[in-house]
Structures are given as structure tokens and as C-alpha cells.
Image: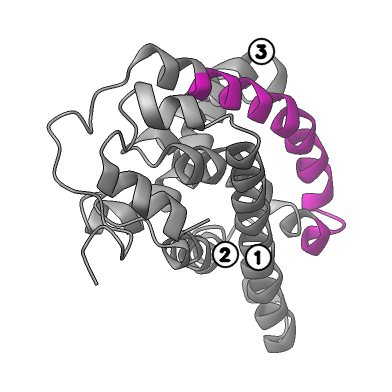
């Protein structure tokens, strides 16, 4: 099996370029993500005290815009770009100011990391889930004091991790489904063929392989 057929992207000098079509697509995902996350940000904050498990059930939504962009465009750093745009749009509405930008970038970093390790040359579906599981484990640890997990029983702690991981996996699955539907509808076709996203025959073979 050739490298392209296995879902690998050949080395191209333009992988880190962002043509206008890519920027516009990322902007659209970013704005859509902000529309989704701004109210969810308030909702999850209100649930932090009385119903933290319900709040964690929403965690996967913070991965959704970046996963969708990465799955559809298969370009380095588009996940972070979408998160940056979403965070900037959210600044006036989130109640946290520019901290919203940092929060969005933090979550998006985990969607990019698995692909960074292979220098964005392989786009297998399981790589998206690797990032989802990683953030689902890291976030409860990083927010241990905020949620006062130390005061919970062992069963509650395990459940907290399980809910967070399940939410992140669910958000990732939804992002993949949305991207695949968009591609079948032709939304990604122009970018793939003309904007330099997988413009080579090998890249297109990799896209077909992972639909």
C-alpha cells in the first residue's frame, strides 16, 4: 500500500500557507463556534457549582469547531486558527474577556497535537480521538482544585473523568460527522482542489480513504 493510500500527505512546501478560501472557511467555523460556545460558556459556568457533572457533559463542544476544520481541511494549524477566531468573537459576550481566547486555544491545542507529532502528514480518523481522550484526561487533572475533586469519593472522581472523556469523544465524533457531511455536499471540494488543500492526487486519495 502506498503512503498516500494509507492516508499520509506527501511533503509539500505550501502546507503552512493559508489561501483566501482556507481563511474564509476557518472564519466561518470560528464564528459558528462562537455562536455555539458563548451561551454554553455561561451555562457551564452556572452548572460548575451545583451540577459539575452536567457541566462536564458539555466539554466536548469546545473541541467541535477545531475538529470539524481539521477533518474537512486537513491543513496544519487550522484548528488553532478557528479557535482563535471563535475566542475573539466571544470576547464581548463571554464574561471572561480575552481569557476566552486562551481557553479556546487550550482546548484546540489537543486537537492539533496528535497531528503535530507526525508533522501533519497523516490524517487518520483515530488521531482525532487520540486528542479527545488526551484532553479528557488532562482537563480534570488541571481543574482538580477548581472542582474540588479531592473532596469527592473515588467513585465520583472516576465518574468525573469518564463523563469528561465521553463528552470529548462525543464532540469529536460530531465534528467528524459534520465535516464528512460538508465534504459530501461539496463544501470542501473547492478547497481541496484549488486552494491547495491536498491539491495533489496523493492527498485526494488520502481524503477518499478516510471518508
The residue indicated by pointer 2 is 140
Q: Secondary structure at mark 3?
A: helix
Residue 207 % position (x, y): 42, 50
Q: Residue at x 49, y 31 (%)?
A: 189
Which labelled disc corresponds to residue 164? Answer: 1
Q: Which residue sits at x=26%, y=57%?
A: 4
Q: Residues within 10 Å of mark 3 (few under 14, many from 20)?
A: few
Name the residue nearer the viewer: 207 or 146: 207
**Please, is residue 130 above or below residue 23 in the view?**
below
For residue 45, which quarter of the picture?
top right
Mark 1 secondary-structure assignment = helix
Task: Work out whether mark 2 precedes mark 3 in sequence or the reverse, and give the earlier one.
Answer: 3
Does dot 2 land on a helix, a strand or a loop? helix
Residue range highlighted in magenta: 25-54
The residue that disc 3 covers is: 92
Q: Residue 203: x, y in percent?
A: 30, 46
Q: Image quadrant of residue 130?
A: bottom left
Whether residue 95 is visible here, answered yes or no, is: no
Q: Is residue 155 above or below residue 144?
A: below
Whether residues under marks 2 and 1 lie with C-beta atoms below 8 angstroms apart, the answer is yes
Residue 79, image x and y in percent? 44, 38
Q: CA distance from mark 2 to mark 3?
A: 27 Å
Q: Residue at x 36, y 22 (%)?
A: 194
Q: Earlier in the sequence, mark 2 or mark 1?
A: 2
Residue 188 visible, this orientation: yes
91 vs 202, left or right, is: right
Near-viewer residue (80 or 139): 80
Amino acid at each position: 500500500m502506498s503512503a498516500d493510500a494509507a492516508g499520509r500527505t506527501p511533503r509539500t512546501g505550501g502546507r503552512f500557507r493559508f489561501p483566501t478560501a482556507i481563511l474564509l472557511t476557518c472564519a466561518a467555523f470560528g464564528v459558528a463556534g462562537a455562536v455555539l460556545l458563548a451561551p454554553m460558556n455561561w451555562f457551564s459556568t452556572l452548572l460548575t457549582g451545583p451540577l459539575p457533572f452536567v457541566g462536564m457533559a458539555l466539554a466536548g463542544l469546545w473541541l467541535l469547531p477545531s475538529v470539524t476544520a481539521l477533518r474537512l481541511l486537513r491543513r496544519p494549524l487550522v484548528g488553532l486558527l478557528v479557535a482563535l477566531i471563535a475566542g475573539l468573537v466571544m470576547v464581548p459576550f463571554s464574561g471572561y474577556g480575552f481569557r476566552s481566547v486562551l481557553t479556546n486555544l487550550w482546548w484546540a491545542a489537543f486537537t492539533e497535537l496528535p497531528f503535530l507529532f507526525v508533522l501533519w502528514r497523516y490524517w487518520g480518523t483515530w488521531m482525532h480521538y487520540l486528542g479527545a481522550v488526551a484532553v479528557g484526561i488532562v482537563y480534570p487533572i488541571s481543574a482538580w482544585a477548581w472542582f474540588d475533586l479531592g473532596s469527592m469519593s473515588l467513585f465520583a472522581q472516576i465518574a468525573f473523568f469518564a463523563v469528561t472523556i465521553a463528552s470529548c469523544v462525543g464532540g469529536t465524533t460530531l465534528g467528524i460527522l459534520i465535516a464528512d457531511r460538508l465534504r459530501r455536499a461539496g463544501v470542501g471540494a473547492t478547497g481541496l482542489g484549488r486552494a491547495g488543500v491536498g491539491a495533489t492526487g496523493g492527498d485526494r486519495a488520502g481524503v477518499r480513504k478516510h471518508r
